[in-house]
């Protein structure tokens, strides 16, 4: 007789849990928006987005253009994806389709442990190992640049991409593969023509999660990309991303100033980018869902 | 008798085929001849090895690391387990239709074209022709001719199974293996597939695993009764059902066990 009541209680509980995460998301966005919007009392939004000079503490006239940081963020993210996506999907395909069970059981946990390395440690490696390596390979006098950041972000996004993509590839029903083999396809053809396309929506999800990691990552890029605010021309230039700017400046800024609010606006821009990436990915994935 | 003449020129000859998964022997020395352009039904209780035998015929067990096969299966006199032979080539000559319809998550046209595309060389007009004739051959063309771009998974179960048959015949195999092709279908769809099998017999040799003894009697020229990994009795269908020799066969077809 109590069953109905318990049922209802649980449905409310789960509804509450679901709503909570939506509320938190909404709250964060509102906080960024309400604070960030006050920037535009003094700054032209277009100048903010496309201006390439960021100098809030200038002696005469402060400038709040995030253009170069925006480009920097997009650059390291794109670079990281160019490296991590093919590697990640390749590893995922290897783990789920080719590797013997024993190899997979060893490799996958190791890969996932990679995700647990603190970003500060990765940044450390970037400064001590990768930086000098890049400098000597390309004959630069400084290896702290966008390329360094891209490579490290790729390493950090890789575990997520591999793990999620592997699950997606493994979820493809065996019957699809059998049908392909029975028509005379070999492993490679089956993988590229049947298995990967069938898991495409999951692979997109893997890419988006990896990309989210790359866009939002702060500590590593702050450490290894050289902290240069000018507009980058190539991957060999030092840069500074949106996230690094917030991390560096928010602790020092005077409360309630335009500079203070502008950092919230930077956060809102980051948030919007992630949101857009997610929406586009969701749309693309829905086209391929079966 | 014409049937035994047929056997001399058997399309497929299975000789002392043994197969085990790990320690478990599933096929214990199967020998049988499958004549060309006939339908042969494999019947028997669950676990008797009939599906395993079927899958051995186009080497699907190659994909199972613990499967060990000995013995021979001759296709037109050549042993398909010969190391010299290319398994891809064998699977093109011996197509397969599965128990559960398994079209790819692709369009109807792409499903049918898959086998040809991966073999390479066929394209454009020619490919369109093959798609049409294959779908016609599978008695599906009239139902899907206006929606070839629709996903194969949007079709009904019975249509999906006929799509899978169209996909199998598109590569012009010589033998079609069918693993309980109607067991996941409603009676009307199952009936369509059965009719189609009789139609396909004109051009193809068909081996079908079935749990449905009426189906075996309706479609099969010969029937093999299998039990615990052995062929107990393999004879023209009518003889097997009307005057079974072995008690095991008799008990099974009268429904005493299964």
Image (tube, coloured by chain):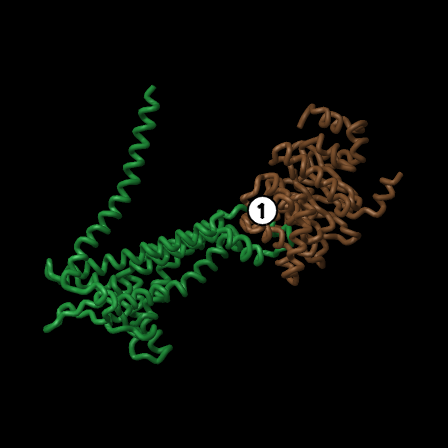
Chain colours: A green, B brown
Question: Residue visible at 31% across and 63% down?
Answer: A122
Quarter of the N terminus of chain A within the rendering: top left
Q: Position of residue A246 (x, y in %)?
A: 21, 61
Question: Residue visible at 20% across and 69% down?
Answer: A54
Mark 1, Cα crowd under 10 Å, few <14 / some 14-19 / many 20+, is many
**Subunit that carries the residue with mark 1:** B
Residue A124 can be seen, yes or no:
no
**B63 and B165: which is toward the camera:** B165
Q: Residue furthest front?
A: B146
Residue matched to label 1: B103
Question: Residue visible at 14% across and 60% down?
Answer: A41
Eyeballing the image, is A126 above or below B74? below
Q: Position of residue B226 (x, y in %)?
A: 72, 35
Q: Residue furthest top?
A: A1
Q: Quadrant of residue B194?
A: top right
**B178 and A251: which is toward the camera:** B178
């Amino acid at each position: 007789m109590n069953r109905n009541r318990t049922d209802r209680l649980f449905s409310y509980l789960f509804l509450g849990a679901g709503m909570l995460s939506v509320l938190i998301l909404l709250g964060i966005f509102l906080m960024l928006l309400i604070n960030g919007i006050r920037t535009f009392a003094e700054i032209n939004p277009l100048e903010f987005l496309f201006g390439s000079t960021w100098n809030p503490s200038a002696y005469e006239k402060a400038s709040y253009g995030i253009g170069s940081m925006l480009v920097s963020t997009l650059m390291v993210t794109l670079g990281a994806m160019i490296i991590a996506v093919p590697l990640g999907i390749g590893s995922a395909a290897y783990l789920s389709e080719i590797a013997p069970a024993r190899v997979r059981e060893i490799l996958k946990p190791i890969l996932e442990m990679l995700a647990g390395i603190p970003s500060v440690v990765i940044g450390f490696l970037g400064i001590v190992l990768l930086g000098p390596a890049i400098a000597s390979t390309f004959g630069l006098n400084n290896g702290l640049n966008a390329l360094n950041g891209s490579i490290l972000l790729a390493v950090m996004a890789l575990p997520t991409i591999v793990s999620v993509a592997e699950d997606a590839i493994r979820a493809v029903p065996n019957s699809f593969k059998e049908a392909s083999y029975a028509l005379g396809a070999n492993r490679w053809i089956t993988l590229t023509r049947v298995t990967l396309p069938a898991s495409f929506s999951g692979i997109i999800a893997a890419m988006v999660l990896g990309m989210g990691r790359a866009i939002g990552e702060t500590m590593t890029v702050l450490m290894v990309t050289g902290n240069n605010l000018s507009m980058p021309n190539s991957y060999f230039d030092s840069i500074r991303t949106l996230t690094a700017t917030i991390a560096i400046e928010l602790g020092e800024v005077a409360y309630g100033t335009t500079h203070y609010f502008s950092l919230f606006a930077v956060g809102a821009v980051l948030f919007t980018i992630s949101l857009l990436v997610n929406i586009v990915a969701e749309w693309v994935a829905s086209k391929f869902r079966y | 008798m014409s049937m035994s003449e047929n056997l001399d020129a058997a399309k497929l000859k299975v000789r002392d085929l043994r197969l085990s998964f790990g320690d478990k022997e599933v096929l214990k020395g199967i020998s049988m001849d499958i004549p060309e352009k006939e339908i042969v039904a494999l019947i028997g209780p669950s676990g008797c090895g009939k599906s395993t035998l079927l899958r051995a015929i186009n080497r699907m067990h190659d994909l199972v690391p613990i499967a060990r096969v000995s013995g021979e299966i001759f296709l037109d006199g050549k042993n398909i387990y010969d190391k010299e032979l290319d398994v891809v080539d064998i699977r093109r000559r011996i197509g397969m239709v599965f128990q559960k319809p398994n079209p790819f998550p692709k369009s109807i046209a792409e499903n049918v074209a898959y086998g040809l595309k991966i073999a390479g060389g066929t394209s454009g007009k020619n490919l369109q022709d093959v798609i049409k004739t294959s779908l016609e051959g599978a008695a599906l063309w009239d139902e899907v001719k206006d929606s070839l771009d629709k996903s194969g998974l949007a079709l009904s179960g019975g249509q999906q199974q006929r799509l899978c048959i169209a996909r199998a015949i598109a590569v012009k195999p010589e033998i079609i293996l069918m693993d309980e092709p109607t067991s996941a279908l409603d009676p009307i769809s199952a009936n369509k597939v059965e009719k189609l099998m009789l139609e396909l017999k004109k051009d193809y040799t068909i081996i079908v695993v079935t749990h449905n003894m009426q189906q075996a009697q309706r479609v099969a020229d010969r029937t093999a009764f299998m039990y615990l990994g052995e062929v107990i009795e393999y004879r023209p269908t009518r003889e097997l059902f009307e005057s079974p020799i072995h008690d095991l066969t008799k008990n099974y077809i009268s429904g005493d066990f299964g």
